Image (cartoon, coloured by chain):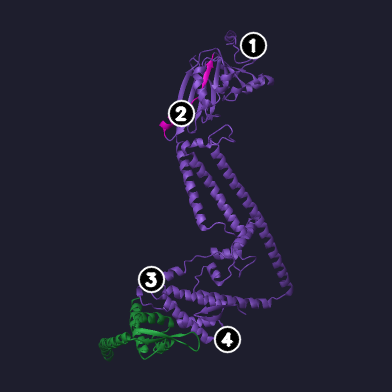
């Protein structure tokens, strides 16, 4: 029993067996290819087709033999001759055609199909084996091993089962095995199948056990049911994934819109949109933000399209859209990486500028750390306020970056001098030393002394439009031996290498919010007991302390 | 390779000459031409004939007409044209010349061979 196909050659209808049709079709394709380079190819091919039709109709006997079989096709093709036996008039064209046809017929590529002839479940492993040119056994072994590892093999198998098409036609099967779809291979494949069929018949004859086959049928039904369930499950999971990806895309869009609308920088901003853009020049922020948006959004879009295609088998966008997206994405990635490289290069060199500032010698100091802006409200009596005015003004301006957390203060003992001083080290990076040095020079860090009070700013600031290039400020407060320092609890956090545990033992918990007393010794700062030294701590910053008592303690 | 090339060249020219001669006898169908060529052991497969016929027709040495057939589609019947007849006459002359040339050149060779075998 064989399936037949109805074909029409030159207005005459033939019933032809499916296999025979495939052989005939590939023969005609070869013929067409062979004559493709001669001027009268259509005429020659139609002559050959007509002749084939005639030979077929000679073979048909009404009522007795109405179908063209494999044998007929083979005989007719043999009579017409193999393409390689043909000669064309133009020897150049012939040799060209021969060369190209020899090169183009078979390039050795294999296509991935599921093999229906050699299957356990879906023929995935057999197909992979054909594709990779490995014994199917090994693929199956790997799959089983992978199954042990958290079921990945199973998942992989199910996904491949769904995604990879089954080799339905003979052409598919030959493409799967990497054979060129020409006449010999068709014949070979046909013969192999016939032999396989015979083998199957004999094997079946030997081992027909009704119980077993019934069990096999039931198993097969169960398997197909399970497969259907998995398809449904996968579709549900796929839908959830698609939904999540869409939500991600919407989130990206919202971020973009918020970033652009809040660019002006008002106090009503939901977040500080300027922050990451301080790494790149202000003029380029639109380009970079949009490029960043596309470089994240396009992969998400691609994933959505892919998921929709895999799960629902529907193409939402054509290849032009795909190529367009790819080009936009590459462009966006290019822009982002350009700025990334540019920015990274700007970190190659470091420069440090050191500024010394002498303190008015006092026997003791109160260290405070404040936002200078707040100080103006607290201590309106400060005389040096005028000189600070400009800085305070500019502090209020939007766009000036407050470099919090990049300030570190150390209190060290001066080696030989008695003059107390503050050393500020401004460090910044740049693509070369000069640029880094200029950046360091532009940094602002304020220290103010008012009698015994030294007020440190709690952040360094950068001028408007300055890029963030690893700017840091190291403050060294150099004190002579014996000098006394009162540290506010706020200052405590900014000072490095402070043996704070000393105070934890001496001060009751309730008192820690005020000033702690310290003295510079040969071994560095030492926490002092208030009781021992009989020092009255200031209630607030305007209270002056008896200096005589301090000299005594020294 | 060289042998094959020469063989094809030789056969090609002769094939054209034979086809023209066969057709010159009167209207004939392609498969009959093939049968004659097969008995003459000049041609093995039909596929070779069609490109040749098309070329001869394009050079206006042949013409064809469609005729109804009892068993299948209408057939192309080929006949020789005036120009074809002239070409055929020229080819006849050439063929005689060639036969002479080949005979003379191979005859002397054959003589030598005979001599060698006689000695």
| A211 to the left or right of A53 | right
Q: Are marks 2 and 4 on the same chain?
A: yes
The 10 Å Cα crowd at callout 2, few under 14, some 14 to 19, many 20 or more, is: many
Q: Quadrant of the C terminus of chain A?
A: top right
How much space separates mark 4 and mark 3, taking CA atoms? Answer: 42 Å
How much space separates mark 3 and mark 1, taking CA atoms? Answer: 110 Å
The 10 Å Cα crowd at callout 4, few under 14, some 14 to 19, many 20 or more, is: few
| Discs 3, 1 touching: Cβ within 8 Å | no
Question: What residue is shown with label 2?
Answer: A440
| Magenta residues, start to end | A432-450
The 10 Å Cα crowd at callout 1, few under 14, some 14 to 19, many 20 or more, is: few
How much space separates mark 2 and mark 3, taking CA atoms? Answer: 72 Å
Question: What residue is shown with label 3?
Answer: A96
| B96 to the left or right of A63 | left
What colour is chain A? Answer: purple
Quarter of the rendering containing residue A374: top right
How much space separates mark 2 and mark 1, taking CA atoms? Answer: 44 Å
């Amino acid at each position: 029993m064989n399936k037949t196909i109805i074909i029409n050659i030159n207005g005459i209808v033939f019933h032809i067996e499916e296999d025979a049709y495939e052989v005939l079709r590939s023969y005609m394709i070869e013929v067409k290819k062979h004559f493709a380079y001669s001027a009268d190819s259509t005429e020659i091919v139609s002559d050959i087709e007509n002749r084939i039709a005639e030979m077929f109709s000679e073979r048909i006997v009404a009522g007795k033999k109405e179908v063209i079989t494999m044998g007929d096709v083979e005989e007719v093709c043999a009579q017409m001759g193999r393409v390689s036996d043909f000669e064309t008039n133009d020897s150049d064209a012939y040799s060209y055609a021969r060369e190209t046809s020899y090169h183009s017929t078979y390039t050795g590529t294999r296509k991935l199909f599921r093999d229906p002839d050699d299957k356990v479940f879906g023929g995935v492993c057999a197909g992979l084996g054909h594709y990779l040119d490995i014994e199917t056994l090994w693929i199956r072994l790997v799959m089983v091993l992978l199954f042990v590892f958290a079921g990945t093999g199973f998942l992989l198998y199910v996904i491949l089962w769904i995604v990879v098409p089954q080799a339905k036609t003979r052409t598919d099967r030959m493409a799967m095995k990497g054979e060129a779809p020409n006449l010999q291979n068709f014949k070979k494949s046909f013969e192999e199948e016939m032999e396989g069929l015979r083998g199957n018949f004999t094997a079946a004859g030997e081992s027909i056990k009704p119980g077993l086959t019934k069990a096999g049928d039931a198993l097969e039904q169960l398997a197909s049911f399970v497969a259907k369930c998995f398809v449904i499950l996968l579709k549900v999971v796929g839908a959830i994934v698609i939904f999540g990806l869409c939500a991600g895309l919407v989130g990206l869009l919202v971020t973009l819109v918020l970033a652009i609308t809040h660019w002006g920088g008002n106090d009503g901003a939901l977040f500080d949109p300027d922050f990451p853009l301080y790494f790149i020049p202000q003029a380029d922020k639109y380009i970079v933000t949009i490029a960043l948006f596309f470089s994240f959004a396009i992969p998400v879009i691609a994933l959505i399209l892919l998921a929709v295609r895999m799960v629902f088998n529907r193409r939402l966008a054509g290849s032009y859209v795909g190529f367009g997206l790819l080009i936009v994405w590459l462009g966006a990635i290019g822009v982002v990486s350009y700025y990334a490289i540019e920015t990274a290069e700007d970190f190659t060199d470091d420069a440090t500028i050191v500024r010394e500032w002498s303190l008015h010698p006092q026997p003791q100091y109160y260290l405070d750390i404040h936002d200078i802006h707040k100080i103006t409200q607290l201590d309106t009596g400060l005389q040096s306020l005028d000189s600070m005015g400009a800085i305070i003004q500019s502090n209020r301006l939007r766009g000036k970056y407050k470099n919090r957390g990049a300030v570190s203060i150390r209190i060290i003992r001066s080696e030989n001098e008695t003059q107390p001083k503050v050393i500020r080290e401004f460090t910044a990076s740049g693509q070369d030393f000069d640029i880094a040095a200029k950046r360091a020079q532009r940094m602002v860090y304020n220290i103010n002394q008012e009698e015994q009070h030294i007020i440190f700013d709690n952040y360094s600031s950068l001028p408007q439009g300055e890029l963030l290039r690893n700017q840091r400020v190291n403050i060294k407060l150099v004190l002579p031996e014996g000098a006394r320092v009162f540290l506010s609890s706020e200052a405590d956090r900014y000072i490095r290498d402070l043996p704070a545990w000393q105070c934890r033992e001496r001060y009751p918990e309730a008192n820690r919010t005020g000033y702690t007393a310290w003295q510079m010794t040969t071994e560095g700062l030492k926490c002092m007991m208030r009781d021992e030294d009989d020092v009255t701590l200031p209630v607030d910053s305007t209270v002056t302390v008896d200096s005589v008592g301090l000299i005594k303690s020294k | 390779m060289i042998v094959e090339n020469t063989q094809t060249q030789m056969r090609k020219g002769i094939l054209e000459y034979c086809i023209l001669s066969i057709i010159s006898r009167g209207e004939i169908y392609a498969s009959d031409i093939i049968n004659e060529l097969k008995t003459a052991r000049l041609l093995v497969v039909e596929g070779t004939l069609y490109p040749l016929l098309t070329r001869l027709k394009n050079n206006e040495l042949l013409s064809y007409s469609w005729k109804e057939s009892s068993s299948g589609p209408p057939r192309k019947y080929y006949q020789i044209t005036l120009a074809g007849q002239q070409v055929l006459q020229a080819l006849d002359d050439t063929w005689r010349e060639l036969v002479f040339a080949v005979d003379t050149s191979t005859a002397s060779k054959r003589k030598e061979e005979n001599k060698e075998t006689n000695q």
